[in-house]
Image (cartoon, rainbow, N blue to C red):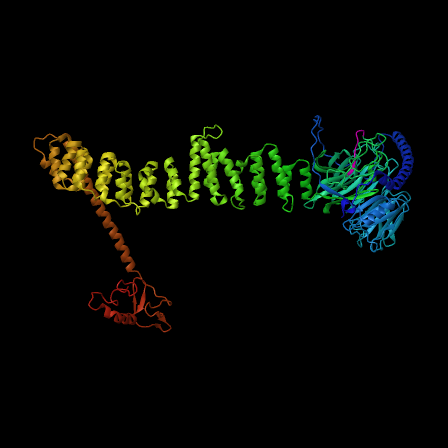
Amino acid sequence: MESAEAASPDPVVSATELAAAVAPAAAEEEEDMKEEGKENGHERQAEEKGAAEEERKTEEEQPGGSEAHPEQQSPMHEERPAELPIEEPEDEEMDDEEEVLLEPMFNYKEIIGSDVTRMFARESATAIFAHDKFIAIGTNAGNVWIMDQTGHIDQDSAPVYRAHRVSVSRLAVDSTGSYIMSAANDGKVVIKGILCDELNYTLTVPEVARSIALTAEFARPASGNVFVVGDRNLTVHSKGFFGYGEKVVYRGSERDGYITRASCQGPFVAFTNEQGTRIFDRSVERVLSVVSPKHDVDRLRSNRHPPHHCWLDHFTLAVGWADTVIIAAITTQDEGGVRRRRVKIHYSWTVELLISGISFTVRDNKWEEIVLIGLKVDSEGGMNGDFLDTISLVSSAPSLLSSPVSPPSSTAGGELAPILQLLILSPVALNEYELQAEDRISLRLSARTTAAQVHLGALPYDGLYFLLAPKFFLYAEPFQPDNKISWRLENGLVEEAWELACRSPESEKKSEVGRKMIEKLIEEDRCKYATSRLKEVCGESKQEWEYFVGVWEAHRMVCLLAECMPTTKPQLEPECYEAVLLSALYNDIPLFRKLVQMWNPDLYRVGSITDRTLARLQEATVSNTETMVSQEEEKSLYLALAHLYNYERKYDSSLKIYLALKDKQIFSVVDKYSLFGMVKDQISDLMAIDSDLALRLLLDNEDAVSPATVMTKTARQPRLQMLYLGKLFSRHEGDQFADTAVKLYAEHDRKALLPFLKSSEKYNISRALQICKEKALVEERIFLLGKSGNRIEALNLIISQFNRIDLAISFCQEHDDRDLWTYLVDEIVKRPQHMKQLLSTAGPSLDPLFVVQRMPADLVVPGLRDALAKILRDYAMQVELQRGCHDATLADVRVLMTSMLGFANAAIGVSPRTRCVLCDKLIVGRGGVEGELKLFACHHTLHVACATQFDRLEESERRGSSVVPFDQLACPICSDDTH
């Protein structure tokens, strides 16, 4: 379709030209309306007279009068009111809420093809029906125009034809798009085929046909070719063998008014008159129910505000009438074992709109929302008059004109002009809906415009909605993502626009929306939040990142980019990273140091940043409050400078900084860049920074510096020497420093001396004894004396210095020397109070008789009797334990022997499938057993001949040995000798 802008370079039409173009149509419409008004006036008089007569008759009837049984009534008169769910009325007053800005759902464009222009030049549109294949439009000249969705007519296959002498009032098309049915006030109903004429038919009705409908299967063979015509009565026409026949299924009175709308869906026919909407079921030939109107019928008459039908599915009907919407569903219920269809109202709404058309939106092949087109109700609710004078399309969606003109608030007479709107309603509850869209399509209307002069043709499953006025034809298609994005941007919904752009990968406005969102966040002083959204907005676009670096730099907040700026995918220009570094250098020194350590030096020019860092350090030394930094910040600057020196390979400068600041990073730098040769003369300084790391560094680089050199350089630092020697000894190195280690441990770490003496064999025992004696280290002396062979002296030292009999006993047990036990017993005889402990503790290591024999006869030993009694009990217990073990062993041997003998005496079976283990032939052949056999307890079987031959082959290997031949004792397969 062509837009208005593409059709003409100057799309703004003057009011005079538009008025001149519309004048003939307006005049015709006004005449028609006057004639219709007169006719309606006579009709209303007749209706009032009929109603009075019916009331008089009703008053004359007796209260107990007879009533027809439901089964005996005629099916066409059996009406049941629709079931309405009960809802509690809400008496709470609603507070005034701020008007919520609703996003438009459609994009509106005028259909201005050459054929449409030709049609509007001489005729005015009065009816429309939208089909998947074409659009049918009826005009005030009685013509029916068939065009495609772009407004073009195919004169060869579907030319314009004149069906009536007056304005076409209703149009209907079957589901196949083969036949068009039209009605007008000339008393005719015309059915005409497109490229077919088998079912063409012209029906003359006694009264003006106010409504018509074709069944969906009208054109299909054997369907009955059913169509419906409604005036006061509803007549169903069907084609039989002798032509079309008719059947009146509903007869209305003058009080009921005319049937102004009818529609078909499967077996159901819905029709509406002044009393409400009825649904007739053709399958059972009865009216299922009547849905009463919700609005004031006397105030909003059907001739100016006609009802509109829309079948949402096979069993759900939506009726839009005046300012109300009712959605009713046909259900099936069991009544006394009989399944009957009933109508239940699901939704009943009142809208601030005089409805001109109703349709729905589709989602997952199901209806989701209701679409309404109509005129906005003014403050007094009065809607009367004729059609518009001048027109411009102004809405919340893009305008049809390049320079839209705002509609006037009132007409020349001071009356408010109506506004054409499209509403989308989402069901919530019975009397509640949610307004999803409220698109204003403000035609410049006169105050006398009615809803009957605007028409809607819908293709909901295609998402297209056609709006028709006497001189204008436009369509509404769903908003595309770019249209929605533009609208949100225009209305300040920037973040919502960005969310939509992210969900629409085909959109080309993502970059624009992202920039506007970030700019708005900055304007709102939400800079940190804006920075957090940059990764989402820029993604991997180098251009976008560099653009926003410039924006942040202009707003003096480049430091915020440090956490989110990418270093790869994409990698930006060096100037971007330098901008962040320089900003951090003067505003956030810890951040500057962090970035220098974290960022790859290839991202920026290291030399330039180094020079600026030196300049910053020089500025910090000047006594200026603006440039001064704290000691911690100064340290961070120097450490950052050391990193920059490392990047420039100026290692001597960086090492000086680390040593001066005593920073542990020096060890990682030395390891990373192999700089041990530059620091080997500063071993003491390294030890002072971190002894563990320094020792590890020394040991990892022992080729560069010998242990002797290290010990010499650390001579005045004995603790460092001990740590160094400990590392050496753990690597089984440094045996030449064992005596030095003994001295160091004795002087500075006594707890480590004894473990070292026990684990090492490289020290001089005499020197170690001398050192321990000088330092009065008794335990170490005892160990060394025992190790050197002076065990008596060591034992004497234990007894005399510690007076620990338990240690003395342990010492004797460790060395198991009789002389030691003798010396210990003699010493304990001198101390009889320890005799009981000796007898109880020595146990099997010492014979009690030996102890008793060494005791003088007159020696009094406390607890000697108890000690001896305990020794005897222990001995008896030990003898009993040995006897029990001996008996258990004999029993086990007996059981095992019995089992072995039973296995050896067991029978050995030979089956027909048993083979000789040597020749692999069957033992039992066809002629029976061949020769003698040998059967072994291991269940191996062989021929004696095979065994003899095998024995001969192995005889040479067995000569001179004590091996017994296999044919006598052992199985040749299981024998260890064979193996």
Residue 626's x, y, as percent? 49, 29
Residue 673 falls in image quadrant: top left
Between residue 423 and residue 507, name the one nearer to us. Answer: 507
Residue 742's x, y, as percent? 22, 39
Is residue 334 positioned above or below 947 on the image?
Answer: above
Between residue 467 and residue 442, name the one nearer to us. Answer: 442
319 to the left or right of 580? right
Does residue 541 show up? no
Between residue 291 and residue 203, name the one nearer to us. Answer: 203
Tell whether position 377 is magenta. yes
Question: What is the magenta range?
Answer: 373-380
Residue at image x 64%, y 41%? 512
Residue 739 falls in image quadrant: top left
522 to the left or right of 219? left
Residue at the bottom extreme?
Answer: 927
Residue 572's x, y, as percent? 54, 44
Residue 477's x, y, as percent? 73, 44
Looking at the figure, which quarter contains the C terminus? bottom left
Residue at image x 53%, y 38%? 561
Tell whether position 625 is magenta. no
Q: How many labels does the image show?
A: 0
Does residue 163 show up? yes
Between residue 357 and residue 545, name the one nearer to us. Answer: 545
Residue 31 falls in image quadrant: top right
Residue at the left extreme?
Answer: 857
861 to the left or right of 87? left
Is residue 857 positioned above or below 106 on the image?
Answer: above
